[in-house]
Image (spheres, rainbow, N blue to C red):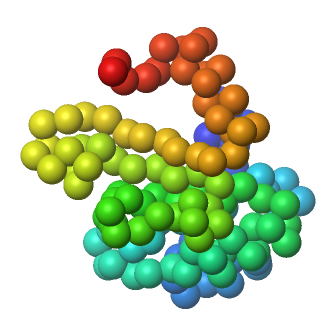
């Protein structure tokens, strides 16, 4: 729970739990990591996308382990993809960064607003 921001979340094992059992009327998004760290469990992104669409939720996928080279969650139905730039994208652990990617205009506009108002972005 993140009380100061009014956010509640459920920590579940998406690999073995029925995600729909945890969706409430207040649920806004599903966040999955696939494959997981450190167990390397794989959750089917397209199956979770079907659940997200059925409940009008945003699907966020942490794609750090596979990187865009091996997996493209946007092509599998994800609305937002996050990567740790410190791991495979950098390759040398000499960068401390994270990346968020979307192909949805509405989400992209919100990202742009946050970047412009908070300054939380990498320089070119």
- Taking the image as shown, residue 67 lies to the left or right of residue 109, namely left
Residue 36 visible:
no
Name the foreground residue: 103 vs 24: 103
At 63% from the left edge and 77% from the top edge, which residue is drawn?
46
Residue 66 in which image quadrant? bottom left
Name the foreground residue: 117 vs 28: 117
Indicate whether 87 appears above or below 97. below
Residue extending farthest to the bottom is 16
Relative image position of residue 48 (x, y in whole percent):
66, 75
Indicate whether 49 appears above or below 117. below
Relative image position of residue 37 (x, y in whole percent):
33, 68
Number of numbered discs visible in the structure rendering = 0
At 34% from the left edge and 18% from the top edge, which residue is drawn?
123
Indicate whether 93 appears above or below 58. above
Residue 19 in which image quadrant? bottom right
Residue 50 in which image quadrant? bottom right
- Taking the image as shown, residue 39 lies to the left or right of residue 8, namely left
């Amino acid at each position: 729970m993140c009380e100061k921001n009014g956010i509640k979340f459920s920590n579940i094992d998406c690999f073995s739990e029925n995600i729909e059992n945890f969706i409430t009327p207040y649920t806004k998004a599903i966040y999955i990591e696939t494959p997981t760290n450190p167990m390397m469990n794989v959750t089917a992104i397209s199956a979770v996308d079907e659940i997200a669409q059925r409940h009008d939720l945003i699907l966020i996928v942490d794609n750090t382990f596979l990187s865009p080279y091996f997996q493209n969650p946007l092509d599998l139905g994800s609305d937002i993809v996050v990567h740790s730039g410190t791991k495979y994208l950098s390759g040398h652990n000499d960068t401390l960064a994270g990346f968020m990617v979307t192909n949805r205009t509405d989400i992209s506009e919100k990202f742009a607003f946050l970047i412009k108002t908070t300054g939380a972005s990498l320089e070119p």
